[in-house]
Image (spheres, rainbow, N blue to C red):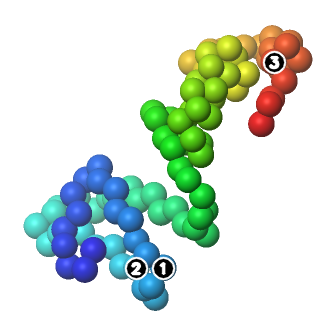
Amino acid sequence: VDGEHIGPHHTVYLTASGAQLTITKPHDDDNDEADVLLLSGAPLNEPIASQGSMVMNTDNEIREAYMDFQNGFMGVPWSEKLTDEEWRKHVARFPSRY
């Protein structure tokens, strides 16, 4: 960014003022592969609170979201394997609040 090397596993925040983004690898890097995740969007212009994987507007909303997650209101963790019938029962028991 502006000539500065950004190492692996780092986050860079860009502004909307530029017209072009160019990503290059260091000259001394023999690896031809790279993974890049580029996200963009309009500014929210509202408060942001985050903890772990939860992002909300207030710390209280974060606490509520974690309680909802722990009570199964956000689905089953990906490590779980459910049959279609088990999933339908779960969704019927815990309808989405969001």
- Give the structural element (helix, strand or loop) at label 2: loop
- Give the structural element (helix, strand or loop) at label 1: loop
Q: CA distance from mark 2 to mark 3?
A: 44 Å
**Label annotation for residue 87:** none
The residue tagged 3 is 94
Left or right of residue 18, residue 4 in this image: left
Q: Nearer the viewer, residue 39 or 85?
A: 39
The residue tagged 2 is 21
Work out which quarter of the rendered image holds the N terminus and state it.
Answer: bottom left
Residue type pointed to by label 2: Leu
Residue type pointed to by label 3: Phe
* Viewer-side label of 2, 3: 3
Residue 20 place in picture, x, y as percent? 43, 85
Q: Is residue 42 visible?
A: yes
Q: Is residue 9 above or below residue 42?
A: above
User: Which corner quadrant of the image does residue 64 belong to?
Assistant: top right
User: Which corner quadrant of the image does residue 43 belong to?
Assistant: bottom right
